[in-house]
Amino acid sequence: MAQSVPVRAGPGGSYLEIARVGRDQVYDALDRSPDGAWYRIRLTRGISGWVLAELVWPFEMVDESESDSPGILARLSQNSPMGDGRLTFSLQGGTLQSDGLFTVRLGYQPSQYYALEISAGESPGKLGNILTYALELMVAVGPWHFIVPFLAVGAGGGTSLPGQDVRLFSSRTQFMLMGGGGVLIALSGFNLRLDARRLVLFTADQHWGALALSGGIMLSF
């Protein structure tokens, strides 16, 4: 960057000046001093010297015959489904025991290590529907690249809505705890997520548990 830069025999201002290089000249960098303050450059074949790093501009030569677009693994590794200050929306389908399950999740990711989500789900069955709603905490367990496994715990409620032709049961709402985990996978433009939760609904005198498995997409904003 300077108009004229001294080239010295060693990485320091006290070494002998052996040459000078000027602006717009390009040289191969062979080494760098441990403190990063000096570059060793090749002057001619068999002759090299040291220049002060703050007086030159380092750059890499790229083969123009190579493709400008990175490979799919390189693109994926630059993305993570967990981030700082992101809002997320997830839409999933799956099973609750032997019945179907549809779940919507709204989330906020304060950091790449954890997230808060509000979930609402519906499971239509032969005897009626079960509605679930909960606040969940997700904690990433690594590796925080394009594939992120996580653990999740939450609490909320579950409401049973019997079918119109079912007289045996009545509508009721129960306290619900849930725990489990899953994995987030970053794809181009959206994230794939797979979840597994153990749901336990409580009443004053009994409880009921079920395994919820779901998969779908998650969008980040």
Image: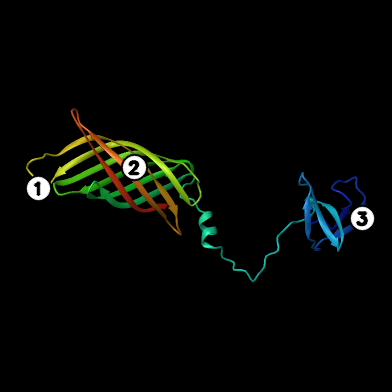
Is 218 left, or right, of 170 in this rendering?
Answer: right
Q: Secondary structure at mark 2?
A: strand
**Disc 1, disc 2: CB below 8 Å?**
no
Residue 151, x across and y down, in percent: 40, 40
CA gap, disc 3 to disc 2? Answer: 69 Å
Residue at the spot of label 2: 118
User: How many residues crowd mark 2 within 10 Å: few (<14), some (14–19), many (20+)?
Assistant: some
The amino acid at mark 1 is: Gln
- Looking at numbered disc 3 in the image, what kind of residue is underneath it? Ile
Tell me the distance, in whole angstroms, between the alpha carbons under discs 1 and 2.
Answer: 29 Å
Whether residue 141 is visible to the viewer of this picture, yes or no, is yes
Q: Position of residue 43 (x, y in %)?
A: 85, 61
Disc sitting over residue 164 in the figure: 1
User: Which label is found at residue 18?
Assistant: 3
Q: Name which of mark 3 and mark 2 comes first in the sequence.
A: 3
Quarter of the figure that contains the N terminus: bottom right
Quick check: 51 left or right of 167?
right
Amino acid of disc 2: Ile
Task: Specify the quadrant of the image occupied by residue 205.
Answer: top left
Query: Left or right: where does residue 68 sit relative to residue 23?
Result: left
Image quarter of residue 3: bottom right
Give the CA separation, mark 3 to mark 1.
95 Å
Q: Position of residue 203 (x, y in %)?
A: 20, 31
